[in-house]
Image (spheres, helix red, strand yellow):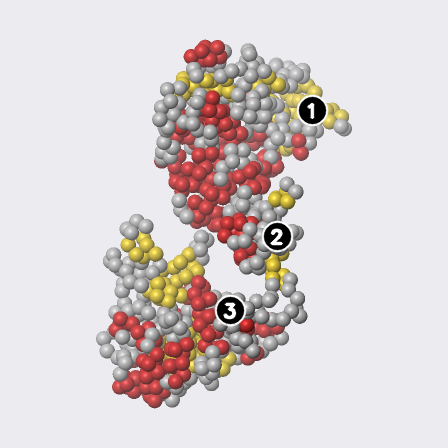
Amino acid sequence: MDMEQPDVRDHRLSRDEIEANFSDLHAPLSRSEALIAADRCYFCFDAPCTTACPTGIDIPGFIQKIRSDNIRGSAKTILSENIMGGMCARVCPTEVLCEEACVRNTHEEKPVEIGLLQRYATDPVIDAGTSLFPRAPATGRKIAVVGGGPAGLSCAHRLAVLGHEVVIFNRDDKLGGLNEYGIAAYKTVNDFAQTEVDYILSIGGIEVRNHCALGEDVSLDELRNEYDAVFLGIGLSKANEIGIEGEDRRGVINAIEYIAKLRQAEDKSTLPMGGTVVVIGGGMTAIDMAVQSRLLGAKQVHMVYRRGPEDMSASAFEQALAQTSGVTIHHRAPPNRILGDDFVTGVEFEDESGKFVLYADMVFKAIGQHTDGIEGLTLEHGRIIVNAGRMTSLEGVWAGGDCVVGGDDLTVSAVQHGKLAAIDIDRHLGGTQNG
Amino acid sequence: MADLKSRFLGIDSPNPFWLASAPPTDKAYNVNRAFEAGWGGVVWKTLGEDGPPIVNVSGPRYSALYSNERRVIGFNNIELITDRPLQTNLDEIRQVKKDWPDRAVVVSVMLPMNEEAWAKYLPMIEDTGCDGLELNFGCPHGMSERGMGAAVGQVPEYIQMAAEWAKKAASIPVIVKLTPNVASILPPAKAALDGGADAVSLINTINSIMGVDYDTLTMYPTTDGMGTHGGYCGEAVKPIALNMVAEIARTKGTAALPISGIGGVTDWRDAVDFLALGATNVQVCTAAMVYGFKIIDDLVDGLSTFLDQKDMTLDQLIGAAVPSVTDWQYLNLNYVEKAVIDQDLCIKCGRCYVVCEDTSHQAITHTVDDERHFEVIDDECVGCNLCVSVCPVDSCITMKQVSDDNADKLNWTAHPNNPMRKTD
């Protein structure tokens, strides 16, 4: 094995080329496109799309309002169930949620473009900062929300609507969680994550404390003492290790860490990228990492998953997106060891036909995340156990999003958890709102 | 291919599709293009008296009712009769008829209610060599305020009087064009017949306001902030026109009148509707104004193919459906149909359930054995056809006869619940 320096460098492509590569994955609909798309909705009884939506948005209802040019009403229908309806319109795997359930699939194998219509309805309202939700009279209650991601923001917004005061404890520089630091850049262009955060905060009654991490800057006990309720939307902050030889070699990187840098980079062409890249994993993060490696100029990108395509948590659309972006996907090949000396030079895999090696200048691990335990909370497989109202085993503490059992690593599910928790907290605090 | 040669009042045309009197037939330039495209005939845009030219507004003359995909389904106009000098029109008509001897060239005319005018102008028009005259008693806007157009067509006595003047002044066939803005189409049709008219054409446009401008909260469209009702036409008016055509065709006193059918003809199927309900030919305007003259290809080809498939001639199609039109009181009340949902075609949208549940007879299920399942509850179904009407899948819900073919027929005139029933 030669010891020459790996082919890792920045500016593999010019800044302009990279900006073009990272433009909007799906162009927004024009008014005429939206009207035609909306006209295809059958306005179903007990609509299957609504049932399939984790936040239960009245989809035929908002589409009907698009048809009548009632965009503000349409946005309100969406945002009243899902305050991150704008982001979900961009990042939801609609092909396995609302659009999969659309009866048009049975009719003509082409669903109503629900995701794009949702974006059409929400963008103008969020861009203009139109206020849609009046706050209930002040309750005098104060709730601590830990985590500034989708679950926390959703919970904070609903609590604010219900008249409570909220303080968000956020460990990062900015709010948004994975919307800001994790989701592929081409799904949320023009800093949409922060635009949406600003929109959510504009309701009022939400104080934000950044750089304030649970267990470091503030403890759960303190919060329980000082606040009427605590909501934990802390996600899964620790990347899983594969547990094989060579994982500590230089050039072996956790995908979520790299993507966070990518999302924050002023000029993406300054990020170092390998000529040949191996991504290990089969989820959305693995796909995002593999595709973005190509967009940054990697010549060869291999995505290797230990099981078959049917087990991938990345949807068929996402898998196809990776393939059309020039990513080679390998199935049923668990990694054996990571090769190299100081720098990584490749990964040895083993599939049913035996061992094989993929040479690599960079290796990204995207095999999931976990949370460290929090004292006093009951966990299962590294996630917090909650009840239907998203209350934990600790009195006065609720939790939601990726950190709880039943979290499925989707923004839309995290939003639903935050919403349900807020409603349950309100009920426990004697509020009149039950949903 | 079935022969579409058409003869209406002795006027021959290669097919039964004429362009109606309207902007597309205002001048030789357009009419020549129409004939090149294959249209069977034209009714030249309405001529009036000689004198100072007609003045139109210079704001919007037209406006449209759209579907969501911006297809024009209804159309409104406030244009008046021709605004070109009479002699120019007469010269062009003469030349066009000379150039296109096999096409029908009928001239629409609108004159004030005095016999001298008719005696003066009709011979001048006939002298162009045109095949016939169409008396415009239909335009509901502008000219009607001056005592012409629909103002004549709404008074059967005026229709009869003007028809008589026209027949006296001209030797070519006279068609009376009727306005639909009346309570019943039969008295105007009867008046045309009594006045000696050779035929009627219908419908002209319907009084209409298209809507309101949501910014200014004025009616739409306006000219300098004010608007007036226009004449409504296009696909949306076809059912109204078909009823009026069928009324004339099935009523004893008017059935003898040949009919030129007008109102929303867009494709060949619309023509089949008009012809089967009693029209001998059809006139088209809006579809041409929306899509251009090329639509004649589908009209001719579609009708011809249809006749081939039916193994019918054009003459056999004309009036074929008239005997099936009757009064409600004669419908067989012992005949029973119920809806049937084809489960293989059903896409489970549930629209049939919603409309039946909310607005009709609660005769469709939404869940069977915990599964989403839409099925007709026969005991509750009255056969109203609402579910068939709203189902987005063609032929998924159909009506099936459940009454015995041999059961006695019973209509309202003899029904026991009718206190006025006829008894033997």
**Disc 3 to disc 2, C-alpha distance:** 29 Å
Which quadrant: the N terminus of chain A?
top right
The residue under label 1 is which amino acid type? Pro
The quadrant in which residue B241 appears is bottom left
The spot of residue B272 in percent (x, y) is: 53, 71
Would residue B231 be found to the left or right of residue B352 on screen?
left
**Disc 1 to disc 2, C-alpha distance:** 56 Å
Say if residue B245 shows up in the picture.
Answer: yes
Considering the numbered disc 2 on the image, is that residue within a helix, a strand or a loop?
Answer: loop
Graded by Cα atoms within 10 Å as few (under 14), some (14 to 19) or many (20 or more), the crowding at tag 3 reads few
Q: What residue did someone put label 2 on?
A: B377
The residue under label 2 is which amino acid type? Ile
Q: Is residue B54 above or below residue A192?
A: below
Q: What residue did someone put label 3 on?
A: B418
- Of badges 3 and 1, nearer the viewer stands 3
- Of badges 3 and 2, nearer the viewer stands 3
Looking at the image, which residue is at 54% across and 43% down?
A: A47
Considering the numbered disc 1 on the image, is that residue within a helix, a strand or a loop?
Answer: loop
Would residue B61 be found to the left or right of residue B280 on screen?
left
The number of numbered discs placed on residues in the rendered structure image is: 3
**Disc 3 to disc 1, C-alpha distance:** 84 Å
Residue reaching furthest right?
A353
**Which of the pair A68/B25 is nearer the observer?**
A68
The residue under label 3 is which amino acid type? Asn
Q: Is residue B18 above or below residue A305?
A: below
Considering the numbered disc 3 on the image, is that residue within a helix, a strand or a loop?
Answer: loop
Chain containing mark 2 = B
Callouts 3 and 1 in the same chain: no
Callouts 1 and 2 in the same chain: no
The quadrant in which residue B131 appears is bottom left
Graded by Cα atoms within 10 Å as few (under 14), some (14 to 19) or many (20 or more), the crowding at tag 2 reads some
The spot of residue A203 in percent (x, y) is: 37, 28
